């Protein structure tokens, strides 16, 4: 009887592992383009097998870009196929309408490269009502960051931005990353698992990401 139960338990465990490997992927965050949502050192889960019809404004997605080599990227979906996207003086416009934002706080911190940063944190609202937080160093920096041309998102493609707006190489840079094809998207991030995030309190007055322990099992919005 005991052997039967062990066999059943082993079978259940095997099925669970197979289902997990089929349904989810595990990634780590090596750089700061998605701060404050994702900190350097965070590990997170993403759902595989995403139907393009299920991708919406504000989703955090994982994707590849064949023209960028074998790297995997994580950014936020800002523009859907057919949308227009533009940034004017640091403010995001989607389909001609400004995305509302509310000031949260001024922050001074040290980034993962050891550089002191001063930013403003805002809550930004997208057309579908999704709210997320962003960092901005300034609203009138380089044209490709804060005063872009009008982008028209092609059919079957998406416009991506990092939440750390002035420290993200994303779809604003058409010569580099550009629009992202739907078939390049390999997952939708939904939860952190654990983190190796380390704040340099000796060099910066604040640790906006909290402690590594506090960054486990956070739902991603």
Image (cartoon, grey):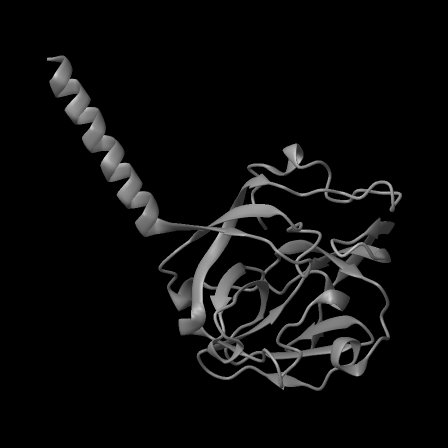
Up/down of 214 relative to 102, above or below: above
User: Would residue 166 be visible to someone looking at this image?
Assistant: yes
Answer with the quarter of the image where residue 141 lies. bottom right
User: Would residue 105 be visible to someone looking at this image?
Assistant: no
Q: Residue at x 55, y 81 (%)?
A: 153
Residue 169: x %, y % from top left: 66, 72
Q: Residue at x 72, y 61 (%)?
A: 164
Residue 147: x %, y % from top left: 78, 80
Q: Residue at x 58, y 36 (%)?
A: 216
Viewer-nearest residue: 144 or 158: 144
Outermost residue on the top side: it is 1
Residue 86: x %, y % from top left: 70, 79
Residue 51: x %, y % from top left: 37, 64
Answer with the quarter of the image where residue 172 lies. bottom right
Up/down of 126 relative to 108, above or below: below
Answer with the quarter of the image where residue 198 lies. top right
Viewer-nearest residue: 157 or 112: 112
Viewer-nearest residue: 110 or 150: 110
Question: From the viewer's perspective, is 99 left or right of 83?
Answer: right
Q: Which of the image's four quarters has the N terminus? A: top left
Up/down of 101 relative to 207, above or below: below
Question: From the viewer's perspective, is 10 left or right of 137?
Answer: left
Question: From the viewer's perspective, is 145 left or right of 2?
Answer: right
Up/down of 153 relative to 50, above or below: below
Q: Residue at x 31, y 51 (%)?
A: 22
Question: From the viewer's perspective, is 54 left or right of 119?
Answer: left
Q: Disc count in the image?
A: 0
């Amino acid at each position: 009887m005991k052997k039967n139960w062990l066999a059943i338990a082993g079978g259940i465990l095997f099925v669970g592992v197979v289902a997990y490997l089929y349904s989810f992927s595990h990634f780590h965050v090596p750089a700061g383009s998605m701060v404050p949502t994702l900190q350097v050192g965070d590990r997170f889960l993403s759902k595989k097998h995403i139907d393009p019809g299920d991708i919406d404004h504000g989703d955090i997605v994982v994707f590849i870009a064949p023209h960028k080599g074998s790297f995997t990227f994580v950014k936020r979906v800002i523009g859907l196929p057919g949308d227009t996207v533009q940034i004017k003086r640091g403010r995001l416009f989607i389909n001609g309408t400004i995305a509302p934002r509310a000031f949260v706080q001024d922050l001074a911190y040290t980034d993962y490269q050891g550089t002191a940063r001063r930013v403003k944190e805002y809550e930004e609202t997208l057309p579908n009502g999704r709210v997320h937080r962003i960092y901005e160093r300034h609203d009138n920096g380089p044209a490709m960051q804060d005063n872009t041309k009008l982008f028209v998102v092609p059919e079957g493609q998406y416009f991506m931005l990092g939440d750390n707006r002035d420290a993200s190489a994303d779809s604003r840079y058409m010569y580099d990353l550009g629009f992202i094809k739907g078939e390049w998207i390999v997952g939708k991030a939904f939860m952190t698992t654990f983190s190796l995030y380390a704040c340099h309190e000796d060099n910066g007055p604040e640790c906006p990401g909290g402690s590594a322990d506090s960054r486990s099992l956070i739902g991603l919005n």
